[in-house]
Image: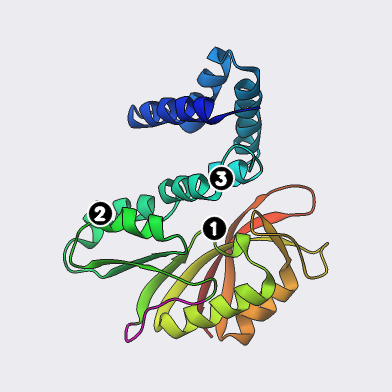
Amino acid sequence: SVGETELLLFSRQMHTLARAGVPILRALQGLQESATHAGVKSLLGELRHALDAGHELSQAMTRRGDVFDRFYVAMVRVGEGTGQLTEVLVPILGTSGLYYGTDIVEKAVEFCRKRFPLPNFHFVRNGQTDLPVSGIRFGIIYLGSVFTHMAPKESDAMLAEMRRLMDDTGFVFADAFVSADVEDYTGGQGMAIVNEAKLLESFTSRGFAHRELYHLNWNESCRRVVYHLTAA
């Protein structure tokens, strides 16, 4: 098993390698090759295998809840999601563009507020299917790794929020795991796979026109698809 001491060492090593610009897969490989603790070596192998298969690091960690608790995974998601996107957009939006970033984890919101203390950048905590933003409509909305963790009813409710917040000339980018082989959906918050036809029906019923931008074949029956949504 992997205890607190091993987890702390792993965290420090990953932090050092990440700051040095070493890619995650290469960092995991190096740590696995040098690990002397059998449990850590096995854990690193599992994480590498999951990343090789196209999973995000946070998704891979959720499979090992005996090692990584929900708070730890949430902090990893900060680097994969809100914080990373914001860093890219800061020089693009400058001081004139308006940016709202949301996350369901309060610690992630606090992290971004401290990291990006800019007057036109705002960070708020969202609910499972609602966003505490009103009086504003957006030209671009990005939902990265949101529908990939939601049941159809939750996705439909979030789509209603997106239509409320999207300008009539705006658009939404959203990704989802889809399959024609599931009746409704399978999986859970770690990875939800939904029936593709029903998801497209949900897009339409919520007032969106949709087109597929690109996809990744996840396995023989599942695809991870990025959709471009506009007002119907």
Residue displayed at 61% across by 46% down: 62
Earlier-in-chain disc, 1 versus 2 = 2
Q: Residues within 10 Å of mark 3 (few under 14, many from 20)?
A: few
Amino acid residing under circle 3: Asp
Q: Which residues are magenta?
A: 130-136
Quadrant position of the C terminus in the picture: bottom right
The CA span between labels 3 and 2 is: 23 Å
Query: Above or below — where is 231 with respect to 181?
Result: below
Residue 199 x %, y %? 68, 73
Quadrant position of the N terminus in the picture: top right
Q: Nearer the viewer, mark 1 or mark 2?
A: 2
Please name the predominant secondary structure of the magenta segment in the image: loop
Q: Which residue is mark 1?
A: 145
Amino acid residing under circle 1: Ser
For residue 204, which numbered disc appears in the image? none
Say whether residue 133 is magenta. yes
Residue displayed at 44% across by 47% down: 75
Q: Which residue is mark 3?
A: 69
Q: Is residue 184 left or right of residue 210?
A: right
Query: Above or below — where is 89 with respect to 76?
Result: below
Q: Residues within 10 Å of mark 2 (few under 14, many from 20)?
A: few
User: Circle 2 — which element?
Assistant: helix
User: Circle 1 — which element?
Assistant: loop
Earlier-in-chain disc, 3 versus 1 = 3
Query: Above or below — where is 121 with respect to 223?
Result: below
Residue 137 x %, y %? 35, 82
Q: Is residue 45 left or right of residue 146?
A: right
